[in-house]
Amino acid sequence: MNQSSRKEAAVRKLLEASPPPVPHDLYTEAVRRGGRMLRRRAAVRRVMWFVLFAAVVAFVVWASTAQPWVEPPSETTPPLSGW
Amino acid sequence: MRGRQASRDARRAREFEAFVAGAAGRLLHAATLLTAEPRDNNPRARSLLTASLAYTYATWDRLRGEDPYDRARQQLAVRFARGVWHRHRGRGGLLERLAPQERLILVLRMYEGVAEEQTAALLGLPVERVRAICARAMSLVLHPPRGPAPKVTRAGKAADAGAGSPVGSGAAAGGDAQARGTGADAETQASAGSRTRAAMSGADRADRTGRTDRADRADRADRTDRTDSAGRTDRTDRREPTPS
């Protein structure tokens, strides 16, 4: 065993010593906050879908009333010549 | 639809509970090492770990076969690295003396056994830098630097000064003698008419350090109109000597 690995082993041993006690409410707290995060994300996703749906509906309504693809009727008379 | 959602929630909760039961101790130890807190009083480590575990819980359904422990550890490291944890000083604990980055790299490399390349990629550092920081942190942990020197009391200081002054004056006298020696040397060379620049500076030094006033004045009168071998008058010799 060379010196560097011996040093590493010594440091590992130092670091491993005396682990702290795990608080009993860690799991419930994590689930509570994680659940809140999940619910918030779901809400944001729902709102985004709703906005997208509303935008699509608005566009369809506008397009069906305005019909921008139809050529507008001519408003000027063609010049009268050779009469 | 609702039933499927409920069953997924239940499965997630079950799996996550098993995961926390297995991994929380080790992760909490790592977090406590990171925040450099004593083992019985580690509020920052707890909140850091709670935040990482909450994130792991929230992304549990998107793990896709990835190791949740890896995910939680990565969250812990990233949150520590970029969060407000930098600004707090250690409050005891094993790694109190280390800088936050040194702590982070030491814990990842030595405690968690993450490979150098992965640590470097996670923190956005070159591999060589990770290696250097880890070596420094290891030597700091193994050989902690001594604390500040103990305060010197007034009595102790006085005794020190009394013991120190004769030695100092002796050394000064020795320096004087040496300077005078070089000065004399320079004089002989000067009278021989072959003064070099180095010798001149030696003479000048001798002037400053310590001859008697009268000898000095005579010497200066002698030297003001003397020119060196190149035919220039040396201005440094005309300078007033500082009183010694």
Image (cartoon, coloured by chain):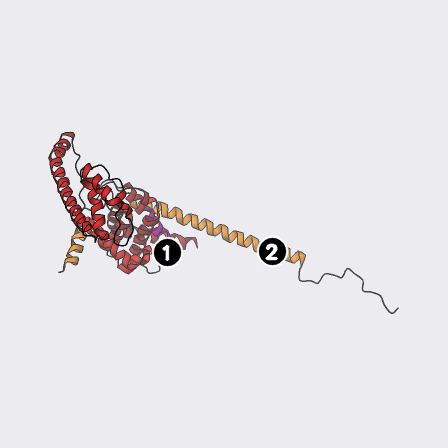
Chain colours: A orange, B red
Identity, as a three-letter code, of the amino acid under mark 2? Phe
In magenta segment, residue B106: no
Residue A55 lies in quadrant: bottom right
Q: Chain of mark 1?
A: B
Q: Are marks 2 and 1 in contact (CB under 8 Å)?
A: no
| Residue A75 vs residue A41, the one in the foreground | A75
Measured as percent of width and height from the top left, residue A19 is found at 20, 47
Q: Chain of mark 2?
A: A
| Residue B24 vs residue B218, the one in the foreground | B218
Q: Circle 2 sits in a helix, a strand or a loop, which is it?
A: helix
Q: Which mark is residue B61?
A: 1
Left/right placement of residue B137 relative to residue A56 reads left
Residue B61 visible in image: yes
- Residue lying farthest top? B155
Q: Which residue occupies 53% across, 52% down? A: A51
- Residue lying farthest bottom? A82
What secondary structure is the stretch in magenta mostly built from? Answer: helix
Rendered-image quadrant of the C terminus of chain A: bottom right
Measured as percent of width and height from the top left, residue B69 is found at 29, 55
Residue B240 lies in quadrant: top left
Q: Which mark is residue B75?
A: none
Residue A14 visible in image: no
Rendered-image quadrant of the N terminus of chain A: bottom left
Measured as percent of width and height from the top left, residue B28 is found at 26, 47
| B147 vs B188: above or below | above
**Magenta region, residue range:** B50-63
Q: Which residue occupies 15% across, 32% down? A: B157
Residue that mark 2 sits on: A59
Q: Which residue occupies 34% across, 44% down? A: B84
Measured as percent of width and height from the top left, residue B97 is found at 23, 44
Left/right placement of residue B163 relative to residue B62 reads left
Identity, as a three-letter code, of the amino acid under mark 1? Asp
